[in-house]
Image (spheres, grey):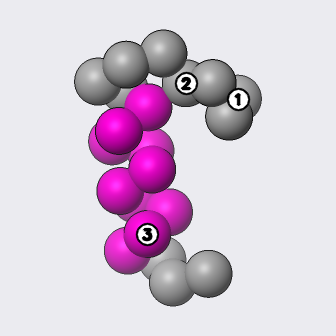
Amino acid sequence: VPFSILVGLLLDGIGRKPLIL
């Protein structure tokens, strides 16, 4: 998985609730 996508998911999780974590 590209690092940019991981960063995008991280920032997206901060804006909402990090469901992945």
For disc 3, the marked residue is 5
For disc 2, the marked residue is 18
For disc 1, the marked residue is 21
- Marks 2 and 1: in contact by CB < 8 Å? yes
| Residue at x-position 48% and y-position 15% | 17
Our reading of the magenta stretch's main secondary structure is helix
Kindly report the distance in space between the C-alpha atoms of the residues bearing marks 1 and 2.
Answer: 6 Å
Mark 2: amino acid: Pro
Instruction: Specify the segment rendered in magenta.
Output: 4-13
Mark 3: amino acid: Ile
Under circle 1, the secondary element is loop
Say which quarter of the image contains residue 15.
top left
Under circle 3, the secondary element is helix
Indicate yes or no whether the magenta region holds residue 3. no
Under circle 2, the secondary element is loop
Give x and y (percent) for residue 1.
Answer: 62, 81
| Residue at x-position 37% and y-position 26% | 14
How many neighbours does mark 1 have within 10 angstroms: few (below 14), some (14-19), or many (20 or more)?
A: few
Residue extending farthest bottom: 2
- Marks 3 and 1: in contact by CB < 8 Å? no
- Of pointers 1 and 3, the one earlier in the residue sequence: 3
Residue extending farthest right: 21
Say which quarter of the image contains residue 13.
top left
Give x and y (percent) for residue 19.
Answer: 63, 24
| Residue at x-position 35% and y-position 38% | 12
Kindly report the distance in space between the C-alpha atoms of the residues bearing marks 1 and 3.
Answer: 16 Å
- Of pointers 3 and 2, the one earlier in the residue sequence: 3
Rendered-image quadrant of the C terminus: top right
| Residue at x-position 55% and y-position 24% | 18
How many neighbours does mark 2 have within 10 angstroms: few (below 14), some (14-19), or many (20 or more)?
A: few
Mark 1: amino acid: Leu
